[in-house]
Image (cartoon, rainbow, N blue to C red):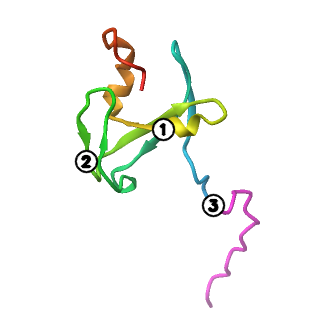
Amino acid sequence: MSPRRARRKESTRPNAFPSTTDRVEEWPDGEWKVRMLSGAGAAKDYRCPGCDQEIKAGQPHLVSWPNWTGGDEERRHWHTACWRKRLDRGPGRTRY
């Protein structure tokens, strides 16, 4: 005799995971939306505004933009360490 199959209850989990992992960060220079990108999510080369070095395709990094209407036009790709240290940069450097 074969064992009886357990009937599954209806799941309360959503059908899919959220499509974005954006978060809002508050810094002394304002609120920023930040999205982490895995190496697989990076399809082309970018230039980091923090260190002025290239972020190669396939390298994990983050994208940030100001948290205001139309701020997504100001998106910039950063090395993760450069993003955390951006307030330590000397005078004459813009925030993006």
Question: Which labelled disc corresponds to residue 56?
Answer: 2
Q: Is residue 88 magenta?
A: no
What element does badge 3 sit on? loop
| Picture layout, residue 12 above or below residue 32 | below
In the picture as drawn, the residue positioned furthest to the top comes out as 91
Question: Rounded to the nearest whole Å, what is the CA distance between mark 1 and mark 3?
Answer: 26 Å
What element does badge 2 sit on? loop
Q: Earlier in the sequence, mark 2 or mark 3?
A: 3
Q: Earlier in the sequence, mark 1 or mark 3?
A: 3
Q: Which residue is mark 3?
A: 16
61 left or right of 27 in image: left
The image quadrant that residue 26 belongs to is top right
Name the residue at 32% across, 26% down. 50
33 left or right of 81 in image: right
Q: Which residue is mark 1?
A: 75
Which stretch did the figure color magenta? 1-15
What element does badge 1 sit on? loop
Name the residue at 69% across, 58% down. 14
Name the residue at 33% across, 51% down. 39
Q: Where does the image place residue 45, in percent across and percent down from the top left?
A: 29, 49
Kindly report which numbered mark, 1 or 2, lies closer to the viewer in this rendering.
1
